[in-house]
Amino acid sequence: MGRPRKDDFDSLFEENELALRLHAKALLPSWDAVDDVMQTASLVMWKKVDQLDSFAGFLPWGKCIIRFESQKYFRTRSR
């Protein structure tokens, strides 16, 4: 099947969106915060999806990006 490309992003994201949202909710205080972080994280994922080695790595990779974006969310809110 090869490496994921930008053309594959929509289907990969759609397949994993619920798991990614639930992961974000475990890290964040509200669903509004989840929406904000998901919007930013999905853009980062789209830009970098061609760096993935496999389709199976999308979910753990996406969770990692959400963790970093959640940390950014808290840093910007604490200022």
Image: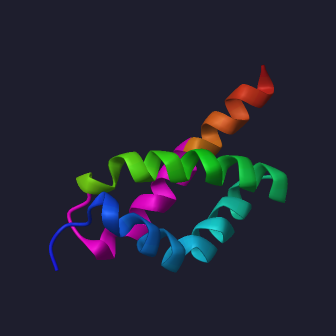
Residue 30 visible? The answer is no
In the image, farthest residue toward the top: 79
Residue 53 within the magenta-colored segment of the rendering:
yes
Which quadrant, please, contains the C terminus? top right
- Quarter where residue 26 is shown: bottom right
- Quarter where residue 10 is shown: bottom left
Residue 63 visible? The answer is yes
Look at 50% across and 60% down and name the residue there.
Answer: 63
- State whether the magenta stretch is mostly helix, strand or loop: helix
Look at 40% across and 60% down and name the residue there.
Answer: 61
Q: Is residue 1 left or right of residue 51?
A: left
Residue 36 position, x and y percent, is 72, 47
Look at 83% across and 52% down and name the residue there.
Answer: 32
Q: Is residue 22 left or right of residue 1?
A: right
Look at 82% across and 59% down and name the residue there.
Answer: 31
Residue 3 position, x and y percent, is 19, 67
- How many marks can you see? 0
Residue 74 position, x and y percent, is 72, 36
Q: Is residue 16 left or right of residue 74?
A: left
- Quarter where residue 58 is shown: bottom left
Image height check: is 43 above or below 5?
A: above
Residue 15 position, x and y percent, is 50, 79
Residue 57 within the magenta-colored segment of the rendering:
yes
**Range drawn in magenta:** 52-68
